[in-house]
Amino acid sequence: MNALGVYIHVPFCKSKCAYCDFYSLAHRDPAGYADALIRQIKSKRSAFHGKFVDSIFIGGGTPSLLPPEDIADVIDALRSYADVTKNAEITIEANPGTLDSARLSAYRTAGVNRLSIGLQSADDEELFMLSRIHTKKEFEQSFMLARVEGFDNINVDIMYALPFQTLEKITRTLEFVADISPEHVSFYGLKIEENTPFGRHPNIDHTLPDEDTQVKMYINSCKFFEALGLKQYEISNFARSGRECRHNLKYWQNLDFIGFGPGAHSMVDMRMYSYKRDLSLFMADPTNEAALLDDDYEMSVRAAAVQYVMLAMRTTRGVNKSEYFSRFGVDFEKKYGAAIAPYVEKKLMATDGESYHLTRRGMLVSNMILSDLLDFEEK
Ligand code: SF4
């Protein structure tokens, strides 16, 4: 029996944030969506054979816009078609302004034991600029309500490198995080994506902090989180001991996960596939796999080995030589030695003899290093 993570995509938001290119739609009625998900889960039940589900991640979008009974029905459906372990990590993403006591209590009853709340910034002006639907105060109220309802495993999403952001401003957001004391923080630099209001803004680049400031923001924040007891375990993720996100670790460890809903991706038994980002198509017939499929291919062992390196290098554990050998039958040092030696010398990568990982400075240029390793692999 192998572990399998389940991802449920809920593509609804109250309104679109200025930077967002996730597949989510504003001002749509989610009625009937949970039923469609359940039909899809049922039609795919054979994918659960021989596996146990130890993580469920309900993401989006804003899943907390669905009625809590819908969330409970989806979790119940998974329990009836899959072997969901007793201590499975069950996460729901939520936005402040969509949470109240009754909803939070219903999530707990349904088995949700981890909450991921989008803060992004503790500065109301920044929140307004990002078109977030909440203020700092509203976030704080939602967070405290979640604590009262018994959530003891909460992630907070934060962004840095925002337009007009200064080191002082990001420090105030960090201090707010220290005050509320979450178990987990996801900390991402803003990326300007095409086809978003930010991406269409002609002068957006001139408003962003310069590169040196962005480096300081990242390094200072990593140190700040670690001083709070939130240990870094991935480029953008920090957690108290034992509170690392089991579900997201599956992505970085190249383990199987299955996704449901439009836009969801899956990797099951070396097969990679994704569904079209098309809610209407999904609602028309969520069981019509052929119509819903976008990408769909079998991954070769070589491609899996490359992907393993690309993803494992994002984690502080890095690439473990023995694990790499036992999964792919290849000596990591023999294969990549020439490519990684210059990075070790420049202290962008380090090794403890068993694993190779990026240093914090290396994480700042991870894209460059990983694309270099990819080029090396393809030669
Ligand atoms: S709440 Fe999240 S998914 Fe929705 S628009 Fe904002 S960033 Fe995108």
Image (tube, rainbow, N blue to C red):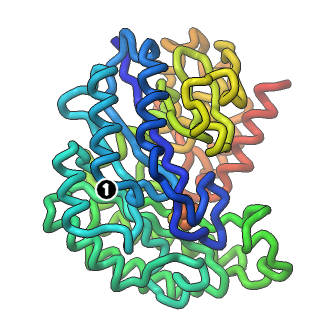
Relative to residue 279, is residue 369 drawn left or right?
right
Relative to residue 300, is residue 126 drawn left or right?
left
Ligand 1 within 8 angstroms of badge 1 C-beta: no
Q: Identify which residue, 94 or 320, lies in the foreground.
A: 94
Residue ID at (59%, 64%): 26
Name the residue carrying label 1.
115
Q: Which quadrant is home to the N terminus?
A: top left
**Residue 293 x/y as whole percent:** 68, 27
Residue ID at (22%, 65%): 146
**Residue 28 x/y as whole percent:** 56, 60
Q: Amino acid under label 1?
A: Leu
- Residue 75 in sight in this render: yes
Answer above or below: position of 195 versus 332.
below
Q: Identify which residue, 344 or 361, lies in the foreground.
A: 361
Relative to residue 89, is residue 294 drawn left or right?
right
**Residue 315 x/y as whole percent:** 49, 43
Answer above or below: position of 66 versus 196.
above
The residue tagged with tag 1: helix, strand or loop? strand
- Residue 188 in sight in this render: no
